[in-house]
Structures are given as C-alpha cells and as structure tokens.
Image (tube, rainbow, N blue to C red):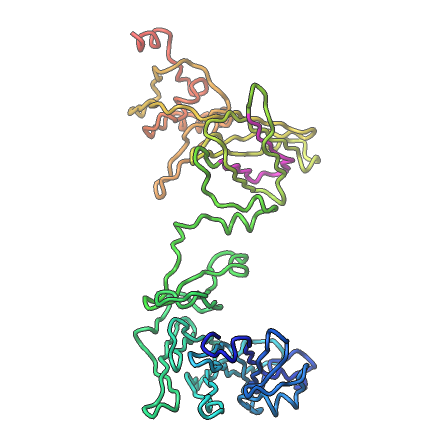
Amino acid sequence: NEQATKKKDRIGCFASWHNHQVGWTGSHGPDRRNIYYIEIETSTGNFYNIHNKQLNSPITFEEANSDALVYESGYNGIFVEPTDARFNKHGDPEVLIHQYINPFNGWVGPRKTTNFIYTAFNSNTSEWYIPIPILEDDDPGLTSLGAFDKTKEKDVPAVMVSRGSSVDYFDGSKSSTGSIPSFTKNNEKSFEAEFKEFKGWLDIRNPHKDGRLMVLDSLRGTEISEEYYMGIHLYGDGGFVERNSNESSGLWKKCWEATTDDECFVETCPMNEKLLKVVLNSAFDVEVLMFKIFERQDGKWDQILKKKPRGELPFSYETCLSVSGDFNFILKARRSNEIDDSTSFGEYKLIWGGDMLVEKEYPVPKEGNVKEGFRFEQKPSSPGPSPSSTSMAPSFQGDCSQNGNSRFLYAVKENTGEKIWRTCNRLTGWTEKKKENACRRDYGNGSEAKFMCRTTCGTCPSVAQRMGSVM
C-alpha cells in the first residue's frame, strides 16, 4: 500500500462471521453473516480497526460487532462472504461481497448466487459506503465468481462476474457529484464461453487487457481427467483464449503417471539426444519384472537405466539417449499365473526419435523367467527399396537372410494413415491364408512382409537373379 504512507506497514483483512450454531445437525454449515474489517501491523502484530483503534487479540464477537463491522447482513436466509479486496489508489480498503443462498444443510449442494455488492471506506466522510449492488439475480441457480479488474487504478474498480459459462464485465464509476459509486455492464468486454461451466478462476499477479484472469473448466474425457484436471483459459479483451493442445509437451500426463520426480520432465531432449519411448503392452498372465538399458562405452556395457513397472500394463516410459550411442535393451518377464499350462505372450515396442525400432511379441512359458534383448544404435540414413508391383515377385536387393525379430509393415489405416507393424516371428505362426494375404500387400514402403520376411513369404531371389541385379 505505497499510496498510503500511514498504512504501508498494514495488512488489510476482510472476514465474515461463520455461525456454526444454526441447528442443522451440528454440521459445518454455510451460514456466513456480516462483513468485518481489521488491519494487522506487520512490525508489531497488533490489530487495528479502520479508525486506527487498537483491538484485542483474539477479537471477541462483541468487539468485532462494535469496532470492526463493515456491513451487517442480518439473518434472512441470504449469506455473505468477501471474495476480493484491495487498497484503492487513495489507500482506502474496498471489498467485493458475494451474496448467496444454500437451501441444503451443511456443505451439501452449491452456494447459489443472488448478488455481488461493493463497498469501500470513504476517507472524506470516515465511513463505509452503503453497499452498492452490481449484479442481482432474481432466480438464483448457479454459483458465480467475482473479482476486481486489477489492470487499472481507478476511483471505483471494474468488476468481473462469472455466470455459468460467461463472464460479465462491469465498469465502475462515481456519480456526477463524485460521491456514490455505480456499475455499468460493458458488453464489449463481456463474453460467452464455449465450455459448459466455470469451475474456478485464478488472479494473475501481473494482469493485462488480454489476460485479466485464468479461467478453469472441467475437461471432458475419462472419469479421472474430469475429477482431477481442468482446462485453463485466459480471459481478456479478446474473450477466452485456450491453450493449443497441439503445443502441449504432455508434461501433465508424465507427472501424473510418474512414480519418482525424475520421471516428470519435459518431452524435448537436449541437442544430440533423441527421446526413447518404451511401451509395454497389456498381456494376459504376463508380469514384466524389470527392464534395463545398457550403453557400450570403452569396450564394455554400462547399465544406464533400470526400471520396474508399477501397476498393471500397459506401461510406458521415456528417456533421452545420445544419438551416437550403442545401446542394449534387456527385459525380464514371467508368468503371473502358473495354473494354465499354455504359453502366454508379452509384447513391447521401442520408439526412438519418433521411429519404430522394434515391436515384438515374445513367448512366456509357464515356469521360469524370460529374458528379451534388443540392441540398437543410430544408423546412417540410406534409401530403401521402392517397389511398385503388388505381386509377390522376389526382390532383387540383398540375400535371403531373415531375422525373426524384424518388423514389417502390415497395414496402413485409411482414415488416419497410422502404420501397423508386425514381426516375422508373428507372421510365421499365422494361418496360410492370412500369411499369403500379408505377403501380397505392398504400400510402396519397402518394409512390407515380402521384403522383410523373405523366407516365410517365399520371396527369396535365386542366385542368378542376385547376380543379374549386380551385373
């Protein structure tokens, strides 16, 4: 409070009387009456009223009514509470008061707004203004929020009030005689939002005309997202501005799923590193004990990561790895149910820098642990084959070696363009008809089954064909 030198050591405090003795099953009821004001001197801890009279600590109910009362609401079923307050440019305290009803006992049911009223201390008359109504609702049914516009210093502040999914903006002014505050709705600064209803809002420490408040609304989606997360918007002269979800780093999701602080980090990686994503898909009767990542340094393998998944699958984890490193991924799993004699199958995939390294389905027998491994490093980019034929004619590039862990392009979704990958091991176990269909497919990618799984598809080139391609 730099404007009022006499009060720069004071903290202003508005409060209401929370009456617990309302005869409602002895619960913590919504009965809030009257508005009081005191000042706390920070250097001494002493309490004072608006007229600089020192008060006792603690302040009794009787003393508050005689020396600190700003507005006496009485008891007529309408309750009051201060929602925003500040020292105005003259150094005098002013407050925005929420009037509401609650037809339910205790905390059950929302507070239904009937009005917002304003008052301030008039240092010229040494009295409080008679409270001025701002927004009166004849049919209360919603809980509204109210706050001062703190972007400007005026004799009477502008007020923002939420009503359902809108914000109404009221300019504050004084009458022509300069004595009585009044409020007029500013339609150009009042906006209707596209979302259903406000769940809350937050003041901004350094507000400006394009961002006076941070407005919160419920996210649509899963039960968890609706209960624990909120959408955030800026409200200002341009209306409501919502953050572009495409620009989100996904940090909130990482931190929500994190089991340690180290797992909560921004998705971008430092220069010369790429993001590795480990995905463990859900599998029947398979428990992943842990996975590790080793890096080859100075001729030996050093463990750089050890992770034990928590909770049920699916599970994902991300970390940044050097683009020049040589890495080995090791996974250990076992059966979670040993009653069934059949073999279960787990599945994992590694995505590095947005490129799929491997998507593998691995067998997990009834007894014992299973160890899976995959070695990877950054490879120089080179053009791949670009077949155009849709036949099963053999490719003349390379020999007939086949790695069962190699993945092939199985399908491309028409609506999204998403690529679906499978492994040669998986292809081998398919029925002949399904295998034949997979081996005939061609998307002009060079990674289809007939090029990656030559032995299974029967597309191995003859010796003469391989020599002819060289000649």
Q: Is residue 24 visible?
A: no
Q: Measured from the top left, where is residue 298 in percent x and y? A: 56, 20
Q: Main secondary structure of the magenta part?
A: strand
Name the side, left or right, on which 82 lies relative to 62.
Answer: left
Name the side, left or right, on which 53 lies relative to 88.
Answer: right
Q: Residue at 56% x, 18% y: name it.
A: 299
Q: Is residue 86 above or below residue 448?
A: below
Q: Is residue 213 visible?
A: yes
Q: Is residue 253 magenta?
A: no
Q: Is residue 266 above or below residue 136?
A: above
Q: Measured from the top left, where is residue 345 in percent x and y? A: 58, 32
Q: Measured from the top left, where is residue 121 in percent x and y? A: 48, 86
Name the side, left or right, on which 294 lies relative to 198.
Answer: right
Q: Measured from the top left, where is residue 456 in percent x and y? A: 45, 20
Quarter of the view holding residue 174? bottom left
Q: Which residues are magenta?
A: 276-295
Q: Residue 453 or 79: which is nearer the viewer? A: 79
Q: Is residue 284 magenta?
A: yes
Quarter of the view holding residue 364? top right
User: Which corner quadrant holds the C terminus?
Assistant: top left
Quarter of the view holding residue 412? top left
Q: Residue 295 or 140: which is nearer the viewer? A: 295
